[in-house]
Image: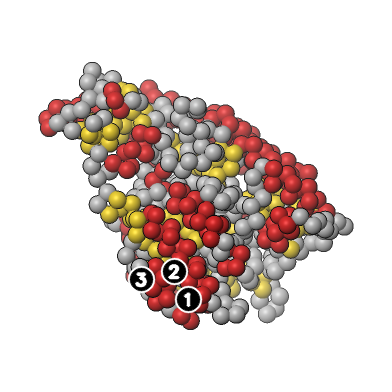
Amino acid sequence: MYRYDEIDEALVRERVAEFREQVTARLSGELTEDQFKPLRLQNGVYLQLHAYMLRVAIPYGVLSSDQLRLLAHIARHYDRGYGHFTTRQNIQYNWPALTDIPEILDQLADVEMHAIQTSGNCIRNTTTDPYAGAHADEIADPRPWCELIRQWSTFHPEFSFLPRKFKIAVTGSPEDRAAIGVHDIGIRLVRSEAGEIGFEVHAGGGQGRTPRVAAKLADFVSQRDLLAYLTAILRVYNLAGRRDNLYKARIKILVEAMGAEAFIAAVDEEFARLKRDGALAVPSEEAQRIAAHFPAPAALEGTPPARRDLPYRRWLARNVKPHKVAGRRIVVISLKPYGGTPGDATAEQMELVADLAERHGLSEIRVTKEQNLVLPHADAGALGDIFDALEAAGLATANAGLASDIVACPGLDYCNLANARSIPVAQAISTAIQRAGLEEEAGELTIKISGCINACGHHHVANIGLLGVDKRGEETYQITLGGIADGAAAVGKILGPSLPADQAVAAVVDVVAAYLDQRRSGESFIDTLTRAGLEPFKEAVYAQ
Amino acid sequence: MKAVTANRLTDGRVVYLTADRRWTADIAGAAALEGEAADAALEAGLRDVLTVVGPYLIDIEGGAPAGAKRVREAIRLTGPTTGSTKVKTKESA
C-alpha cells in the first residue's frame, strides 16, 4: 500500500488543525452557519436528518488492517457502533457530534486517513477495481495510477471550485469492474501493439437526473502524458461548464452540449499546449517510486480446504475468486445479510475483518462500489478458517453478485435530499428473494435502489433499478430494467408507473420470476431483456 | 398547526422550539402555533444561531408530524426505520 510521505502528513495535519479552529469559531459565533457550511463540507461533514454525517475518504477503496481498526474505533466511540460503506468506496458515519469531529480527524490522521475532498465541487475519491493487483485478467495494477491522480488532485488550486463535483474511475482489466462508462472521467489501462501500457480515456458519463454514458476521447494516452491529458479535460470543463444551473453543471451536460467531437477537439488543443509546456509530464522515476508501494504478493503453497459442509462450499463457489498468484484467492465479504442494511458493518465486524486480513491476507482490505469488503490476497489454505470466522460474525452470506447483493443509498432514513426510503425496500427485497428461492437459479443479477434522482444508489445502471419518488407525500418506486454499470454501460428503461413500497418489492420478485420463465439457455438477464423486450416484464408486474 | 424544528448545532440532533423559546428533543413539548405566532416563533428560532442550525416550520397534528412531509418528519422524530440490529436506538446510544 502507499504510505504517506512528509508532504502528505503535513497537509493532513494542517487541515485538521485548521478545521478544529473553524469548529471553535462556529460554536462561538465568530463564523455564521453560511460561512461555516462550505468549510465543513470541504472536510466531509454534512448535516443530515438526525445528525451530522462524516464521510471519510478511502483512497481507491484500499484499507490496511490498522486503518480498518481505527474506523471500528471511531464507530464504537464516536458513533453508534457501526459505519456505512458507500458506492464511492468510502465510509460514512451517521451520528458523530460536530464537537467530536476534529478529534476524529486527528485520529484518522494517525493512520494516514482524512475526509478531504469527500464533498464539494472538487475531484472526489478516485475509484477502481476492488480486485486491483489480484485478478488474473489485469493488464496492469491501476492503484499506482489512482495514487498519482490522488496526489495530483489533492488541493489542486485550479480544480478546487469546479462547476460541480467530479468523479474519476480507473480499471486495469479488460473486464471493467469500476463502472468507467458512468464517470466524469473513466480510464482503462490498455496495452498498445508495441507493448506499451497507456490509457484509454472516456469522459462525460454520469448518473443523477441526466444519466449519460461517457464518450471515448482517446484510444491511447501515454503514461508520461496522463496528468497533462486529465488537466486538459478538467480545464475545458472548468472554463466552459455551466455554473448558472446546478442541474446542468456536470461535465456530461457540457460534452452533450458541445458534441463529443467538438469537446475532443477542445481537449486536444489544450493537451497539445500542455505537452509543449512539459511541466505536467509524469517522470518515469516518480511513476516507479509510487508503483513500488504496490508490490505483487508472494505465491503460497496452500489450496482451499476440501470440506463437505454446504454453507462453506456455497460460499467458496460464490464469494471466492481466482487470484493471479498461486496459493491466494480473492474473498468477497458480503455486507448484505438477508434482510440487513446494505453496506453497514459493526465495529466488531470491522475488527474481525482487519484481524483476518492481518493473519491471512497481507493486512489489506478493499471496499467495493457494491458496498462489500474484499480480502484481495487471502491465503487459499486458510479459507476454511476465514469462512468459519466470517460465518460466526454474520459476514459469510454467499450472495456476491446475486440478486440479494443489493446496492442502496441511505435514503430517507438518513439523507436530507431523499424523497423515499431505500434501505427498508432493499431489506424487504432481499428477504422476499430468499423466500422465493430464486436467486441461485437466476445467477448474477444487479438490483440497486436510490431514494432520489441524485442516484447515489446507482439505480440507473442496475439490471433492476428502483428510484424513490414522492407522490403527494407518499413514497413510491419507479422500476427500471436493463441498466449495466460495468463494461458496456447502459441506462435502464422505465418499466411503467411507480408503485408503493410493498408492490415494488413484489414487482421485483415478479421480474426475476419472469426472467426465469423467459430465459433461454446461457442467457443473462440483459440477454433475455434484449431479446424479449420489456413487454413480458410489464405483463408480469402490471397485468394483475 | 405548525411547530418550529431544527438541528442542534453541537451534535445535529433534532429539536423543537417550546412556547418559552427553549429547544427540546420531545415533540410533545413543541409549541403548536398558527399564523403570525408561528412566523414569530420561526424568527426567534432563526436568531438562535449558537444553539441550532436551519430552523423551519413543520405541520403537526395531535403532537405528531402531519402534512405532505409527515413521513420525513416522522423519521426525523423517531430515527431510522431500518430495523437493523446494527442500529442502536436513540435511547440506548
The three-letter amino acid code for the residue at tag 3 is Ala
The one of A253 and A379 positioned closer to us in this rendering: A379
Residue marked by disc 2: A481
The secondary structure type at the circle numbered 1 is helix
Quadrant the N terminus of chain B occupies: top left
Percent x, y for residue A254?
37, 66
The one of A109 and A49 positioned closer to us in this rendering: A49
Residue marked by disc 3: A543
The three-letter amino acid code for the residue at tag 2 is Leu
Percent x, y for residue A458?
46, 59
Q: Mark 1 lies on which chain?
A: A
**In the picture provided, is A304 more to the left or to the right than A252?**
right
The secondary structure type at the circle numbered 3 is loop
- Give me the disc on residue A414: none
Q: Residue at x 51, y 33 (%)?
A: B88
Distance of label 3 from label 1 (alpha carbons): 18 Å
Q: Which residue is drawn at 23% across and 31% down?
A: B62
The secondary structure type at the circle numbered 2 is strand
The one of A137 and A222 positioned closer to us in this rendering: A137
Percent x, y for residue A533?
43, 78
Q: Quadrant of residue A368?
A: bottom right
Q: Which of marks 2 and 3 is in front?
A: 3
Judged from this view, the residue extending furthest toward the top is B20
Q: First in sequence, mark 1 or 2: give its number.
A: 2
Q: Which chain carries label 2?
A: A
Residue marked by disc 1: A529
Distance of label 2 from label 3 (alpha carbons): 17 Å
Q: Which of marks 3 and 1 is in front?
A: 3
Q: Which residue is drawn at 79% across and 57% down?
A: A308
Up/down of A144 relative to A225, above or below:
above
Judged from this view, the residue extending furthest toward the left is B36
